[in-house]
Image: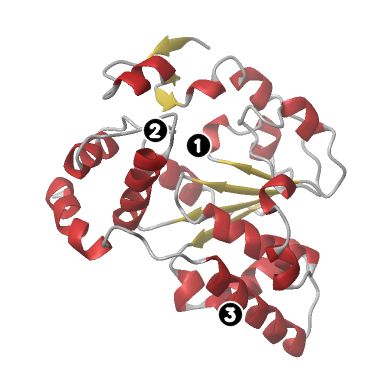
Amino acid sequence: MAESEAETPSTPIEFESKYFEYNGVRLPPFCRGKMEEIANFSLRNSDIWIVTYPKSGTSLLQEVVYLVSQGVDPDEIGLMNIDEQLPVLEYPQPGLDIIQELTSPRLIKSHLPYRFLPTAMHNGESKVIYMARNPKDLVVSYYQFHRSLRTMSYRGTFQEFCRRFMNDKLGYGSWFEHVQEFWEHRMDSNVLFLKYEDMYKDLATLVEQLARFLGVSCDKAQLESMVESCHQLIEQCCNPETLSICRVHGSLELKMR
């Protein structure tokens, strides 16, 4: 499978880091040279995967999934470096070799599109939790992330960033295709499709779905306790966006018409 350099980086730092295109999808530079190895990554039936497009509530979801699957107290999670418990498949650290050797049950994250995830996953192996987020909110968070990330130091306007988002010029490609691919597999027995907004609108149903999907047995009282713990966890994790979503929605609306 051929890899080719992506064109038109918007900043000098972006130019130096050089996104590249793999089968028509723009990916971060650290994915270069490992896509075949990722496709052949060995799965276990006990694996739990969290997959999202970047800035779709990944950090919050991993905390909730860890609490539901491990049955730990939210205060305990607050004392842990949860990222060390859930490595990202394609990131340079800790690396594919180390992730492959982790003890079961492995909890693994990825931002890769469905088509690029391990082939065994397409065949029904492992449990995959996918979360989608409203793109208007997501692009605000993604914009802030690019501005704060030292390796990117994005200094373009929000309107320019939206244009890049709409034209698939950001890492991990098109949000629309990313979500659509998983939506088409939402009925697969090993896939659970969730929405970020439901963590605030209907947390009880979301937690119940997670528990059922992960095979966690609990009675009504235990479920209610789990929901309350997840609610506490969400309150601890949530930070207000520093850029008003209401203020930038109008700009994105114009780009999406």
Q: CA distance from mark 2 to mark 3?
A: 32 Å
The reply to whether dot 2 and dot 1 touch (C-beta < 8 Å) is yes
Kindly state the secondary structure of the residue where label 3 is placed.
Answer: helix
Q: Give the crowd class for mark 3: few <14, some 14-19, many >=20 residues within 10 Å.
A: some
User: Relative to 120, does residue 15 appear above or below in the rendering?
Assistant: above
In-image side of 191 versus 247 (left or right): right
Mark 3, residue position: 204
Residue closest to the eye, 238 or 251: 238
Q: Which mark is residue 113?
A: 1
Residue closest to the eye, 78 or 248: 78
Q: Quadrant of residue 215?
A: bottom right
Kindly state the secondary structure of the residue where label 1 is placed.
Answer: loop
Which amino acid type corresponds to the residue marked 2 in the rendered image? Answer: Gly
Q: Earlier in the sequence, mark 2 or mark 1?
A: 1
Image location of residue 150, percent across then percent down: 44, 33
Q: Residue at x 49, y 56 (%)?
A: 57
Q: Which mark is residue 149?
A: none
Which amino acid type corresponds to the residue marked 3 in the rendered image? Answer: Ala
